[in-house]
Image (tube, helix red, strand yellow):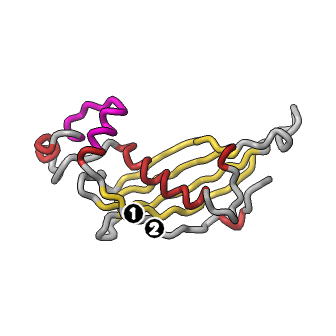
Amino acid sequence: MALDQSFVGRSYPPTDPYEVGREKIREFAEAVGDTNPVYTDPEAAKALGHADVIAPPTFVFAITFKAAGQVVQDPQLGLDYSRVVHGDQKFTYTRPVRAGDRLTVTSTIENIKSMAGNDILDIRGEVHDEAGEHVVTAWTKLVARAADDEAPAEGQA
């Protein structure tokens, strides 16, 4: 069943602040195999003009994807999350995420379309620090695969 187009443009309340910790940044950098010392060594970060360690560019996915949960769990939207796969992710930064940041995310449904029986949902997450300054915008594309009985017949896609 196609998602309701009237949800395009709907924004959800900002999340509670997420406090970015040095250890979380270090763990993330290690998990993705990024050995850049700016992610783990405060002195290396300071040498590059940062007040503390900064996070790898994809670190913010963890908090923006969690924030997108407000959209996914909206019962009025009617998204069957058991059929969802992650389609794409992109980020546009104003500044790096830093240890000590307290970040909130406001999620907005930017687009909904149907293609070959699948629903494609684009969610924009605006990330701000506790001073209200923009840090990064993240776009998440989710694809809700058509149920087997809803998929178009072969040759009708």
Residue 31 in the image, given as x and y percentages of width and height: 35, 33
Q: Which element is circle 1 on?
A: strand
Q: Is residue 127 above or below residue 139?
A: below
Q: Which residues are magenta?
A: 25-39
Assign the C terminus to one quadrant of the image.
top right
User: Can you tell which mark lies on residue 148?
Assistant: none
Q: Which element is circle 2 on?
A: loop
* Mark 2 or mark 1, earlier in chain: 2
Q: Any magenta on residue 84? A: no
Check disc 1 and give the amino acid type.
Thr
Q: Which residue is mark 2?
A: 14
Residue 63 in the image, given as x and y percentages of width and height: 42, 53
**Marks 2 and 1 in Cβ contact (< 8 Å):** yes
Dominant secondary structure, magenta: helix
Query: Looking at the image, which residue is at 39% across and 49% down?
Result: 60
Query: Looking at the image, which residue is at 31% across and 61% down?
Result: 102
Check disc 2 and give the amino acid type.
Pro
Q: Quadrant of residue 123?
A: bottom right
Q: Is residue 149 above or below residue 129?
A: above
Query: Looking at the image, which residue is at 61% across and 67% down?
Result: 9
Crowd around label 2: few <14 · some 14–19 · many ≥20 (10 Å)? some
Residue 146 located left or right of residue 130: right
Crowd around label 1: few <14 · some 14–19 · many ≥20 (10 Å)? many
Q: Which residue is mark 1?
A: 104
Query: Looking at the image, which residue is at 61% across and 47% down?
Result: 142
Q: Is residue 58 above or below residue 103?
A: above
Q: Nearer the viewer, residue 94 or 88?
A: 88
